[in-house]
Amino acid sequence: MKRRLALAILFLGVGLASGLKAEDVIRNGDFSSDDNVWRRAGKIVYLDTSGKVVDKGTEGSKPVFQLDLTPNRWTVAEQTFRNRDKSKSITITVRLRASADFVRSDAAEYSDVNFKAGGTYFWSAIVYPKVDFFVRLADATHNYGLINLTPGGDWQTLKLRLDDLSPTQKERTLFLNAAPGTGSIYIESVSAVSP
């Protein structure tokens, strides 16, 4: 009897400890696998230290996710993941940079919302604010994190912390949105960590 009780307590302790561990719910968020799990747009390429696309295996190169812009429409990649343990919180982090020839189109249609780069927004509908790039997490509402990029600039980090998500939502979809224009946006990593 004591042995069963001790085992039950041990399993409960292990279960609780594993439940407290933060977990990245994004698959292949560092793009180290050639398995592209992102839907719609984008591809895995390799950049050298100068930011030039090179062949896989080139010394010093690293895998990144490339979104090629189109002049009159948004370029969107998405990944759906399971909501871990009915979590209401998640932190999304994206490391990205723009190619040297990146130019956002001002002639394209943008949504009439007062969203600014650097902000976090919640909205009841899908909108396309006038920024270079944004992430959108589809939950019971739409959650937005926005950033503007410098053509040919350094790696930048977009971080979005959400604490009031619907705990009953079984799946969530993360959208990576590149503005209409020319050039490319390179994504070094994507993570969505749920406590």
Image (cartoon, rainbow, N blue to C red):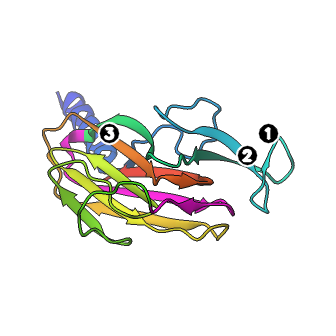
**Which amino acid is tagged 1?**
Lys
Viewer can see residue 22: no
Q: Counting residues from the N terminus, which is met first, the one under dot 1 or under dot 3?
A: 1
In the rendered structure, find residue 173 and report the number of the disc placed on it. Answer: 3
Residue 26 magenta-highlighted: no
Q: Using the image as rendered, state which of residue 139 and residue 23 is in the foreground.
A: 139
Q: Is residue 129 above or below residue 63?
A: below
Q: Counting residues from the N terminus, which is met first, the one under dot 2 or under dot 3?
A: 2
Region of the chain picked out in magenta, as a range: 85-106
In the rendered structure, find residue 151 and report the number of the disc placed on it. Answer: none
Viewer can see residue 85: yes
Residue at (58, 71) in percent of width and height? 150
Residue identified by numbered label 1: 56
Real-space CA distance between mark 2 and mark 3, rounded to the nearest whole angstrom: 26 Å
Q: Residues within 10 Å of mark 1 (few under 14, many from 20)?
A: some
Residue 4, image x, y percentages: 21, 28
In the rendered structure, find residue 46 and report the number of the disc placed on it. Answer: 2
Residue 167, image x, y percentages: 14, 44
